[in-house]
């Protein structure tokens, strides 16, 4: 599969090796995860490092009790919590211009902005995938009911897929009425990385707006928005950037900003082609956006290439060993580039729910059984170790999985 964004040049040495456990344990120590069980499914959120948490704490009282006007302690932040410095730090990290980045409170705000904001007429199609988040599809369905828009799905394979197969599916699905193409950068359950540039180029050729849900790519793999070719991209900062919950950003390519309506009308009459029109959402809790620069400093200190390599290393450490078992079927191509820290699998003779329950009850390890909302047959067991996980935790999972497979061997043979 061709790249869907820049990857680390393997000829360039990493500053820190992915198996330098002493170093990564020191990073874990700065994050101090407060998990009750060993958490190996980290797609919902990651623990913010102490430096970010301390920054938020230091600003809480100030945010709740400050004076206004000449005594405003957040004078450099707009009412939305945004600032030129914050937007530029995000633009530099993700390969965009500062005038193409708007601060949001989460990925969903950016997603809702685009899915509701692109002008469509009754009968126009939004082309999406069954791997899109449920909430994304809910937004499209509401618009379909309200405006007579048509939701159409791309028939993508479940599990490993080549770029050729993915592109063939998109080419077969896109039509004359397709005006908006919406898809995830990374399929959250299986770790499949979508070929963003070819899909976006296809959409442009057919006169459609291309939108990417980057909730699981931002901070997980290297992302250069100026190379992806998409018209818009939304992400949060609390997952793989390890920032405070309630922070995110929306990228809209400069030439397409005027084509997207903001969720809230601009009270200061920002022009249609201003990225800042998306930031006028009313009063926010400024301690959160004021901590973004600390979040960015943490990520720069660790390094994106180093983060990505570590996440892949943790995935490969469990997935390659488990894949050798005769009853295990991987739903992830471990050799695909770029690689993520996600992988999913199924076990013959054992449902995902049964496996996850045994793992949690008997070993105190949390993994995620899943089934895609649009097709319950698309199901499996998902793992996504994060920077706060250790090799010891991953190895303990493999030992526990092996034990579960061994003790269910007889019942599996009888069923067969």
Image (spheres, rainbow, N blue to C red):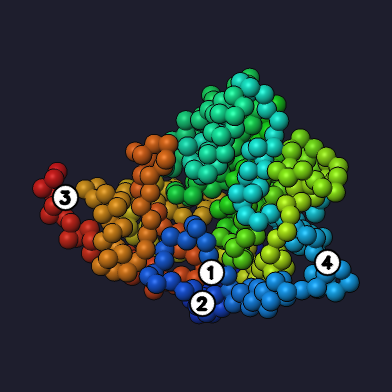
Q: CA distance from mark 3 to mark 2?
A: 40 Å
Q: Where residue 94 appears, x then y in whole percent?
A: 70, 55
Q: Where residue 415 appears, x then y in whole percent?
A: 13, 45
The residue lying at 51 percent from left, 55 percent from top is 340
The residue lying at 62 percent from left, 27 percent from top is 147
**Quick one: 115 or 207, which is closer to the camera?**
115
Label 2 SS: loop
Q: Quadrant of the C terminus?
A: top left
Give the mark toward the camera: 3 or 1.
1
**Quick one: 79 or 246, which is closer to the camera?**
79
Residue for badge 3? 412
The residue lying at 75 percent from left, 61 percent from top is 81
Q: Residues within 10 Å of mark 1 (few under 14, many from 20)?
A: many
Residue for badge 2? 32
Q: Which mark is residue 47?
A: 1
Image-quadrant location for residue 316: bottom left
Q: Residues within 10 Å of mark 4 (few under 14, many from 20)?
A: few
Q: Would you place residue 24 above or below residue 153 in this image?
A: below
């Amino acid at each position: 599969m061709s790249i869907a964004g820049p990857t680390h040049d393997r000829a360039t040495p990493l500053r820190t090796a992915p198996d330098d456990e002493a170093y990564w344990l020191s990073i874990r120590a700065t994050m101090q995860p407060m998990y009750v069980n060993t958490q190996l499914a980290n797609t919902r959120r990651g623990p913010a490092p102490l430096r970010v948490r301390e920054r938020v704490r230091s600003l809480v009282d100030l945010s709740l009790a400050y004076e206004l006007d000449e005594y405003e302690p957040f004078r450099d932040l707009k009412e939305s919590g945004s600032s030129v410095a914050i937007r530029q730090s995000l633009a530099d990290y993700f390969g965009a211009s500062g005038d193409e980045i708007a601060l949001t409170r989460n990925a969903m705000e950016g997603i809702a902005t685009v899915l509701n904001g692109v002008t469509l007429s009754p009968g126009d199609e939004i082309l999406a995938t069954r791997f899109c988040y449920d909430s994304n599809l809910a937004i499209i369905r509401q618009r379909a009911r309200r405006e007579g828009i048509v939701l159409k799905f791309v028939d993508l394979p479940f599990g490993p897929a080549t770029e050729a197969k993915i592109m063939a599916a998109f080419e077969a699905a896109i039509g004359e009425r397709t005006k908006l193409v919406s898809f995830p950068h990374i399929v959250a359950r299986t770790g499949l990385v979508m070929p963003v540039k070819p899909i976006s180029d296809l959409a442009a050729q057919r006169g459609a707006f291309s939108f990417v849900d980057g909730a699981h790519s931002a901070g997980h793999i290297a992302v250069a928005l100026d190379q992806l070719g998409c018209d818009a991209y939304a992400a949060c900062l609390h997952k793989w950037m390890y920032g405070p919950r309630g922070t995110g950003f929306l990228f809209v390519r400069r030439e397409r900003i005027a084509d997207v309506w903001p969720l809230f009308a601009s009270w200061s009459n920002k022009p249609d082609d201003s990225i800042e029109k998306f930031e006028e959402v009313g009063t926010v809790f400024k301690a959160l956006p004021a901590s973004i620069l600390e979040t960015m400093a943490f990520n720069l200190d660790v390094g994106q290439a180093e983060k990505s390599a570590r996440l892949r290393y943790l995935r490969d450490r469990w997935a390659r060993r488990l894949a050798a078992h005769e009853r295990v079927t991987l739903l992830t191509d471990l050799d695909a580039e770029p690689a993520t820290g996600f992988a999913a699998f199924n076990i013959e003779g054992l449902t995902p729910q049964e496996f996850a329950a045994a793992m949690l009850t008997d070993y105190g390890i949390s993994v995620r059984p899943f089934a895609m909302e649009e097709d319950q047959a698309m199901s499996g067991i998902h793992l996504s170790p994060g920077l706060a996980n250790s090799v010891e935790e991953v190895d303990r999972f493999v030992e526990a999985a092996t034990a579960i497979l061994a003790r269910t061997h007889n019942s599996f043979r009888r069923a067969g």
